[in-house]
Image (cartoon, rainbow, N blue to C red):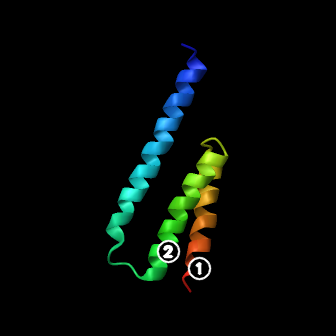
Amino acid sequence: MNNIYILNIVKRYLISAVAATMLLGLTGCSGMSGQDKSTAIGAGAGAVGGAVLTGGSTVGTVGGAVVGGVIGHEVDK
């Protein structure tokens, strides 16, 4: 097998594991206000979206989380 092919598979599994961990972590949000929940969900979705769109780059993931968090925070005002 090609090493690049193996690295791509590992990267996909890693991104999926991070997304699943974030979604499971959101179950701890039961004591949060609606706006806090929207912010957390927006940040999680933005991080996943940023990671997918940029091929897993750190800057894309963090940027997506920031943008998603801000949008989630403003939506529930």
Image quadrant occupied by the C terminus: bottom right
Q: Taking 57 as reference, is 31 above or below it?
A: below
Q: Position of residue 46 (x, y in %)?
A: 58, 60
Q: Taking 69 as reference, is 65 above or below it?
A: above
User: Callout 1 environment at 10 Å: few (<14), some (14 to 19), or many (20+)?
Assistant: few
Q: Taking 12 as reference, is 40 above or below it?
A: below
Q: Residue at x 64, y 58 (%)?
A: 63
Indicate which disc residue 75 carries: 1
Q: Are marks 2 and 1 in contact (CB under 8 Å)?
A: yes
User: Callout 2 environment at 10 Å: few (<14), some (14 to 19), or many (20+)?
Assistant: many
Quote the CA–CA distance across marks 2 and 1: 8 Å
Inspect the image, locate mark 1, and give the three-letter code of the amino acid beneath it: Val
Name of the residue lying farthest toward the bottom: 77
Inspect the image, locate mark 2, and give the three-letter code of the amino acid beneath it: Ser
Horizontal side of residue 32 vs 51, given as left or right:
left
Q: Position of residue 62 (x, y in %)?
A: 59, 55
